[in-house]
Amino acid sequence: MGCKVLKVLFVSVLLFFLSFDLSGVGIVPKPVYSQVKEGVIVVNSETGIYVENELEESALFIQKLISKTTGLPVERIYQLQDNAIILNLDNQREDLGDEGYEIDICSDNIVFTVYNESALFYATQSFLQLLPAEVYSSESFKSEYEVTQLFIRDYPRFAWRGMMLDVSRQFFDVDFIKKYIDWLSAHKINIFHWHLTDDEGWRIEIEKYPLLTEKGAWRGENEVLPPAYGSGDERYGGYYTQQEIREIVEYAKKRNVSILPEIDMPGHSRAVTVTYPEVLCLSNDTSTSVQGIPQNVWCAGREENFNMITDILQETADLFPFEYIHIGGDEVNMQIWESCERCAKLMEQEGFDDVKELQSWFVRRVEAIVEGMDKKMIGWNEIMDGGDLGENTAVIAWQGSDYGVRGVKEGYDVIMAPAQYLYFDMAQSPDEQGHSWAGKVPLERVYQFDPHMPEEELTRFEIDNIMGVQAALWSEYLDSPDGIAEYQTYPRLSALAELAWTPQDMRDWDEFYERLTFNHLERLYNMGISFRLPPPDVIYSDGYIKAVQPFGEKVIRYDESGNTPTFESPVLNKPIKTDRADSFRFRTFYRSQGSITMPAFPYPVAEWNPETTPLNYEEVVYDISDFIDMAGDYNVMFRLRSGRNGLLVRKVSLYVNGDLVDEDIHDGVMAAGRTSNNIYSLALENFSKGDKIKLGIEMQGRWGVDTFGDILLYNSAKWQLNSDD
């Protein structure tokens, strides 16, 4: 046998790996160490699985996984032979940790070595990524596969690598949840945070309180919950039975995914209060939550409520073996408590002067309930407000990394999930659907995040309290089109997987994007994921439409009559000469999957950036003489490229040879959260060759100067652009 199952000291192995070449391995997330050797091994119908130790259950699952993915039998063998996949559990390899693995592929066999049996799953996922991407599609099975000989040693940066899916605003059936878990596990994501309850629907069967699902799981014209987020007047909703939940939990367990259930309280509870209205405060308060929802808060002063909460959490704890239960705790409309006689009495008894203290009291009360079930409580970062929590409680920092810093300094275990980087419900560009209150969150921004970004503020001990990282997909805007949940998740989750798994000093955006484009998108395509493609970057200049050509298999297709390009439309592979650029539309395609549709934009005449943007309003002047060749009516348009804070403009002026000839005065906002009134109209009545023409823009940064953007100038007679293009 060429590959031997060896027990090697960690120090020796580490020294050996320092010289390893990382090229040639297109795995996502990127392995810690890898070395490509010379030669290949052929995996075919003769390849079997040999178990070195007692790994019966894992061996069976790994066998089925490889067989299902490749279409090969990969039968269990009981005598070591050439062309075998050897599963080796080595109790001396503590250096690999519970999730680390080694893969050694030689000319005669393939060896997976792990310290913990569950890590075989991660070894298998990496091995499958060494095969052609077509193995992820059952329509492309082959009789044999050549696999490059190499060595990989790998283990995760963080123990907590999570993804949250909101199933309250939009309901996803069991089959989709299983697919979603499959896709997460293929990326070595090990926590599925299941947001099961909120104002718009209760999704978990609680046998002691059947109305929660009989009524609270449904929206519609004649339901207790009104239509919301595209559900329409027809009855919409659904829930997961306890049997379905047990099935999903077991399904996830086999794929190394733990499920974190979330039962949101004391706010975000309209689905409870409309089905069991006795849980509400004795109050006629008409105030609403930040989302505009009335009467969605549990009454803190009603003692019976905590009996109900105990019952709900007990059934939840019985269904989910994971050590944590998430209780929400965010965005509570505490004003309702202020006018409730029961809450007022409780505050007097406890000596509270502010309802924020009541919020903290409520959270600590629920914490005691959770810990009484031998579970640990976890919540959004608001649970830190108002008082000390138990040492076992953990916090998810969603409002920003600074909340994570605060959490670890106060002694809590923290999961970093800042919305500005990791909320996948945020739009990915100014032209796409999604939230924008936390800014646009394109793929590169996800990859830029480092959960240890604020480490200069933290001690080594405090940094160790950062358990990991997690993204979230809230589903308000996921009602349409088909596949939008996948579109919002991928390939951003591929970036999340790498920042959660791969050491920070090994991560490089350009290298990751190359692996993603030339290897991983094809895997996602064959998995059947409707992933997002970046829209084309197309400009019109000097009478020609030109485009920045995308990587790899992606192409740009166009339609010259203003219609949406299809897979059958012509490919833009060279500049197009035209005097009607405004009638063209463009889409990026990866095989049959297309991006959003975009027009061609005029060539930018200038840009703004952090260095040129003033903190307070002042005029910034740009020379645009090279871009003007005739008199006429012109529009100036501002287009944000990146950054959160944005740009404010209140006047644009046109100067010819130093003289003011026209100006447009109105407030324009160019920001990730809101873009409005960003077109300014100017008239150039006379033009002579050689005129010195300048734009004066009175502008300032919006809350800061972190943004980059383009300033577009176009003749309004030739173009029909608007601020929504």
Image (cartoon, helix red, strand yellow):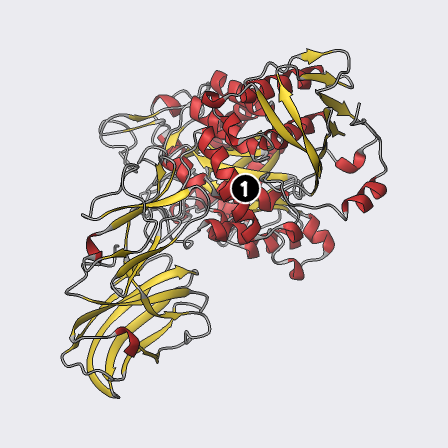
Left or right: 303 in relation to 484: right
Residue 4, quarter of picture: top right
Which residue: 56% across, 38% down?
A: 162
Which residue: 26% across, 88% down?
A: 658
Query: Local crowd at mark 1 within 10 Å, few (<14), some, or many (≥20)?
Result: many
Which amino acid, by three-letter code, is at mark 1?
Gly
Query: Would residue 263 be visible to someone looking at this image?
Result: no
Which residue: 41% across, 55% down?
A: 439
Which residue: 35% across, 31% down?
A: 277
Residue 55 lies, in percent from the top left, at: 73, 18
Q: Secondary structure at mark 1?
A: strand
Residue 499 lies, in percent from the top left, at: 59, 46
Residue 110 lies, in percent from the top left, at: 71, 26
Residue 610 lies, in percent from the top left, at: 45, 70
Q: Is residue 472 above or below residue 132?
A: below
Left or right: 269 in relation to 32: left
The residue labelled by disc 1 is 379
Closest to the observer, 663 or 717: 717
Left or right: 476 in relation to 303: left
Q: Is residue 610 above or below residue 654?
A: above
Q: Quadrant of the C terminus?
A: bottom left
Residue 279, quarter of picture: top left
Residue 255, quarter of picture: top right
Q: Quadrant of the N terminus?
A: top right
Q: Residue furthest toward the bottom?
A: 658
Closest to the observer, 373 or 551: 551
Closest to the observer, 61 or 393: 61
Q: Residue furthest toward the top?
A: 78
Query: Would residue 644 be visible to someone looking at this image?
Result: yes
Number of numbered discs visible in the structure rendering: 1
